[in-house]
Amino acid sequence: MSEETIKEMESVLNLQKKLHNSESPPSYDLRMDRLKRLKEMLLKYSEEILESINDDYGTRDKNSTFLSEILSSLGSVDYSIKNLKKWMKPEKRVANATQPFLTRLIMSFLGAKTEIQYQPLGTIGMIKPWNFPINLIISPVAQAFAAGNRIMLKPSEITPKTSLLTKKMFNEFFDKTEIEVFLGGSDVAEAFGKLKFDHLLFTGSTSNGQKVMESASKSLVPITLELGGKSPVIMDETCDLATSATRIMRGKTVNAGQICIAPDYMMMPKGKVEDFINESEKAVGYMFPDIKYNENYTSIVNEKHFERINHLIDDAREKGAEIRTINPSDEDFEQQEGHKIPPTFVLNPTDDMKIMQEEIFGPVLPIKEYENLEETIDYVNSKPRPLALYYFGTDKDSENKILDRTTSGGAAINDVVWQYGQEDMPFGGVGESGIGSYHGVEGFKQFSHQKSVLRQFKSDLIKGMMPPYEGKMFENAKNQILKK
């Protein structure tokens, strides 16, 4: 990386900070204008977005890309547009909340008021990944703009054409004082992460998240980390196997499983595995009658990741796992340039297998059998807290027990993945799966400083409680409190 790139990043950051400090917070009209330009940008470049992502992957289902990258992103922007005025209003709080009701009423009548003002933080840095290279940018950008911030963005080098298009789009619709995009590899990302932003959002692996957090801590830059981990699926005896298999295989084949909230392992009641696999074969065969040359079945993003996933499968096989592949047309995947991996189950996995230690990020699903529900809870709780947890079944007691006794960033009942699309709920991790959250009003608040403001009444009613403590007001108050 050149010194010129570093100087350019520092120059843009200094310019954005200078303007933030010298100007009033962006008005409602300016924020709305930025959000509307963001929407206009998406609509204008929607076809190019589909093409660039498809080119970066080799093959990526354009229908799925439209839903996940275009439609979902438009939903995030529209939700911010719809709610912006409400979000920007100061939030009233109770003044002197510890005082008796009558005292509070008198103080309020005299003019004591408290509120929370949502103030722009300044410049938000964003380091974003390759698996959803548009949506995972647009969604937080919309919320950061709604909160009145300026933005510096580092997209992934793993999807270079889409990243180049991202820079082109933003440079056309926005000035660099509003948002600027910086391209480059891991060295640029490392230097970017060391800048003294007012907040830094990182989406990626847990290991890289640790590095980002360590780097940001040196400058005390506040961070939001959206990481991943191994999200479990717990199947109950009461689940409908056919429906469950259909929904799980939909979620596991979207983007070929390259999703941070994709199911990463399954806990299945003993004796049900074969029935589940049979139903999964039906579901996959219906969605993808063939896979190898099917444009609706997404490739693994590049050869490095393709080989990594295959190594996980090979390691599990060598250590005693049974490998079951869903291959509706009995195609040969040994010789191919498309980096396609068909849906694959790993049966009887053990914890010494790499596939049970690393996030898979592919269409591969280990299945562990259990005899009672307590086993599943104990197993989930013995692992780092996941970004998502999924329960399939109709037993409310089991459902509540799992939700109450496990901790995950989010959860879904009788489906997978779709909780991400709920714009009115916070999205984020917990523990090793992340810090902080965004989406909707939570995103607005995450990218705002919540400033507490007290407007005190004019009358000096507390004079007797202050030095030199003349009169009996202090003693009376003290005695009244101690008597309680």
Image (cartoon, helix red, strand yellow):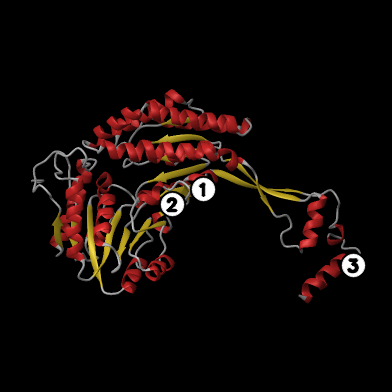
CA–CA distance between discs 3 and 2? 53 Å
How many other residues sit within 10 Å of disc 1, few (<14), some (14-19) or many (≥20)? some
Q: Are marks 1 and 2 in contact (CB under 8 Å)?
A: yes
Residue located at (30% from left, 38% from top)? 65
Tag 1 or tag 3, which sits nearer the N-term? 1
Amino acid on which disc 2 is placed: Gly
Residue annotated with mark 3:
472
Residue annotated with mark 2:
428
Instruction: State the residue in front, 339 or 86.
Output: 86
Quadrant containing the C terminus in the rendered view = bottom right
Tag 2 or tag 1, which sits nearer the N-term? 2
Residue located at (78% from left, 53% from top)? 108
Q: Judge whether 104 appears above or below 373 on screen.
A: above
Q: Judge whether 161 appears above or below 292 on screen.
A: above
Can you tell which quarter of the image residue 335 is in? top left
Amino acid on which disc 1 is placed: Glu
Residue annotated with mark 1:
442
Q: Position of residue 49 (x, y in %)?
A: 32, 31
Quadrant containing the N terminus in the rendered view = top left
Residue located at (63% from left, 30% from top)? 22
